[in-house]
Every structure is written in structure tokens, then in C-alpha cells.
Amino acid sequence: MRILILSDLHSNATALNAVLDAAKDRWDFSVCLGDVVGYGPDPNEVTARLRELGTKTIRGNHDKAVTGLMDTEDFNPVAKAAVDWTRSELNPEHMAWLSALPKGPLETDGIVLVHGALQDEDEYVFTPQQALDGLLDSNAKVTFFGHTHHQGGFSYEDADLEVLQIRPRSAESFAALRIEPTRRYLLNPGSIGQPRDGDPRAAFAIADLQHNVVEFWRVPYDIQAVQKRMRSAHLPEPLVQRLAVGR
């Protein structure tokens, strides 16, 4: 069973379409780690596509903010402006679907899905110390998390906690990670809609745990087309510019 792992789509339909084209015929079902909307120009299109695919989706902080389940007082002005614009654009049916998304952690098909940390869906997990509780407490050997927009992760066995710097080089489409049966894993597929790890290509993962392999993918997409739509929508310029640099 091959699982397509999506995260942090952030209303970027062009990036999502590029991901689905690259992953065609390589997966059996899909999951999403949250932040379907926010930042980008295509909230209705991205939400509709996930619903069409039947993607098993948990909520992210931007999904909560847009639907009124979370206060935006801690959001920076740029992020808050994008939330307000998205809220005004979403049609009622998609808003209702986003409002009903479950909170992580969510166990499904032998893996666990979280948006941020296992214990706090809004916490960013960047360091081994932050990852340790999730590695120890998750009910699955492999847990997928998002929120940081950084591809990679952590593994653990017998007090040996390893940082996994696993992502494809600029000339590669994917890099494969072999899952060792005695280790536990906390893995981030990266962001589709707004990467922040220095590679502007859309990021995702494909997990085939029957064969003990997780592939970390990057695919190029038409960034300028997305930037044009963002400027037409009068979304904040810093959000427009960061797509090109992946920061």
C-alpha cells in the first residue's frame, strides 16, 4: 500500500497539480497533514481537489484561523492579511469542510498524522529535543508531521536520536529513505505550497511501508503564474517573493 503524503498546501493549486502529475500511478491513497489554505491565491481550488481525491486530512493552524477556530492575534501581519483574504474568498461548502477537519494525531493505515508536534498541533518541531516526545509517544513506528515546511525528520532507537537530512538534490526528483524495522521515525514531507528549506520546488513524500521505503520528492512548478495570481488578489508582497527562493 503506497501512501501519498501531502502537507502545507497553502492554497497553491499550481504546485498541487504538479505534485499530483509527478506522483501519478505511484500511490494508492492520500493523506494531508494540514494547512490546506492560507498564504496562496487558490483556496477553493485546492480544497476542492483534496475533497475530490478523498484525501484523509487533518487540520493545520491556518485552516483553524481561516474558519474561526483559532484567534489570529499571534499571527504576523502578513499571515493575518492572508487569513482575512482567504476567509473572504472561500465558498461556504469548502469552509464547512475545513471547519470539520479532525485534530491530529490521527492514526490511519499503520501511520500517525500530526500537523505540528504530537502533543501540540501548533508547535513547530525543528530540533531533536522537540522531536523526542513524539518519537517515544506515538502509537506508530512512522509518524508524519508538517508545519515547519522543512523536508526531513528524525529517527530513534535505544537512546540514539538521529537527524535525517533527507531530500533530493537539485538535479534529482526524489531521495529514498530505508525504514529500519527496529527504529522509530518522525518524518516531514515538506511543504507543497510554500517551501522554506531553500528549495522552491514543491515537496511531498510517498510511503511504501510494506517495502520499508519512504521517498522524499521535489517537483518544479510555474512559480511566476502563482505570483501573478497573488498580486492580482493583492496578497502581501513578501508572500509573493518568498515562493521563488523557498524561504
Image (cartoon, rainbow, N blue to C red):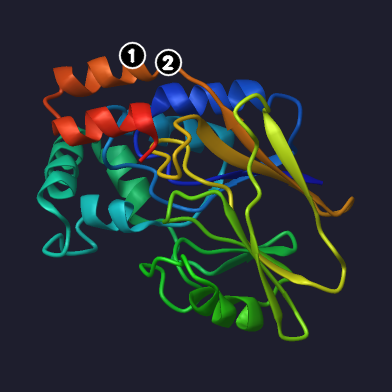
Mark 1: secondary structure:
helix
**How many badges with numbers are in the image?**
2
Where residue 47 sits, quadrant-wise, is top left
Q: Amino acid at mark 1?
A: Ala
What residue is at 58 percent from the left and 79 percent from the top?
132
Q: Which residue in the structure is indicated by mark 2?
A: 222
x and y, in percent, of residue 92 in the image? 25, 39
Quarter holding the C terminus is top left
Position of residue 82 relative to residue 142, above or below, is above
Pointer 1 with pointer 2, Cβ within 8 A: yes
How far apart are the alpha carbons under marks 1 and 2?
6 Å
Residue 205 located left or right of residue 199:
right
Q: Amino acid at mark 2?
A: Asp
Tell me what residue is drawn at x 14 percent, y 54 percent: 76
Comparing 198 with 191, the one in front is: 198
Q: Position of residue 141 (x, y in %)?
A: 74, 70
In the rendering, at what x and y percent does residue 151 appear?
A: 55, 49
Q: Is residue 162 left or right of residue 115?
A: right
Residue under pointer 1: 225
- Residue drawn 60% across and 28% down? 170
For label 1, count other residues whose C-alpha is less than 10 Å away and answer few (under 14), some (14-19) or many (20+): few
